């Protein structure tokens, strides 16, 4: 039986449920009645927190932006070496399957218009951060922008592969994943910044850390 207490669930509970629905079914999966059934509550719980579906979408997108931009970039920015920042960012954005599914669903959505606004803002913030990382290697701004565009293009391509050819993308606990991360971390750095053959590229440890952050 659905729970009748209006505020048993928080607004954040509903926002997280909406993100899970987006990951599983796309934007169209965010519908009040099905979410209420999945959460085991009545629609009254929803209207206790939100005026309408768009208000729920806004709350969900706020959570997504904070987690996938503010939180990720804050963690990566803790690295003082720009080369290590680039390497850590590669691991962070390639590990969580749920985050990949949400980004793919949002980036392909054409309505409501507010979704596109969030996607463009998140993408711009990520790209600007990557540009700054490459500039930190001593590059001019235009060269840093070209390298950053290449790196971001690889990330977007990985999302497409995960969606269209999921068997080709190894799980984060698969040794093949760590090996591919090593490959990316070397080849997405300019030649004079690449680690020597004897240098340790910390892909495996980084992958395990990122997996703990959300490989669902």
Image (spheres, grey):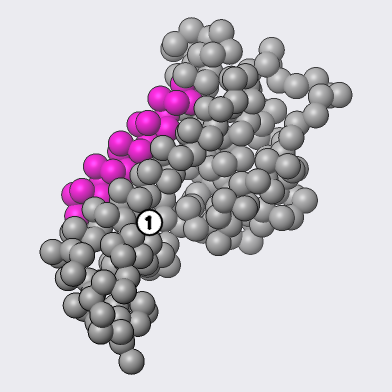
- Considering only vertical position in the picture, is 159 above or below 22? above
**Quick check: 115 above or below 188?**
below
Label total for image? 1
Residue 118 lies, in percent from the top left, at 28, 43
Q: Which residue is mark 1?
A: 105
Q: Which residues are magenta?
A: 112-131
Q: Which residue shows up at 45% across the image and 26% down it?
A: 129
Residue depicted at 15% across the width and 65% down the height: 52
Residue that protrudes farthest toward the right in the picture: 198
**Residue positioned 35% across, 82% down in the render:** 40
Q: Position of residue 158 (x, y in %)?
A: 54, 46
Residue 169 % position (x, y): 63, 54
Q: Nearer the viewer, residue 172 or 70?
A: 70
Task: Let me know if residue 143 is in the magenta part.
Answer: no
In the shown orientation, is residue 153 left or right of residue 125?
Answer: right
Task: Name the residue rendered at 24%, 53% in the picture.
Answer: 58
Q: Quadrant of residue 30?
A: bottom left
């Amino acid at each position: 039986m659905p729970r009748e207490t209006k505020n048993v669930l928080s607004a954040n509970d509903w926002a997280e449920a909406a993100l899970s629905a987006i990951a599983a079914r796309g934007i169209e999966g965010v519908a009040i009645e099905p979410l209420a059934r999945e959460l085991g509550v009545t629609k009254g719980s929803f209207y206790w927190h939100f005026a309408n579906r768009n208000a729920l979408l806004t709350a969900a997108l706020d959570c997504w932006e904070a987690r996938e931009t503010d939180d990720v970039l804050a963690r990566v920015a803790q690295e003082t070496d720009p080369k290590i920042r680039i390497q850590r960012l590669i691991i962070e954005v390639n590990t969580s399957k749920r985050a990949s599914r949400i980004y793919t669903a949002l980036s392909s959505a054409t309505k409501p218009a507010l979704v596109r606004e969030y996607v463009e803002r998140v993408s711009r913030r990520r790209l600007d951060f990557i540009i700054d990382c490459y500039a930190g290697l001593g590059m001019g701004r235009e060269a840093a922008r070209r390298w950053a565009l290449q790196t971001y293009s690889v990330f977007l391509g990985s999302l497409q592969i995960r969606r269209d050819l999921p068997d080709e993308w190894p799980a984060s606990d698969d040794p093949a994943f760590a090996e591919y991360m090593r490959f990316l971390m070397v080849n997405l750095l300019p030649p004079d910044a690449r680690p020597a053959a004897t240098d340790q590229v910390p892909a495996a440890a980084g992958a395990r850390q990122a997996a703990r952050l959300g490989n669902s």
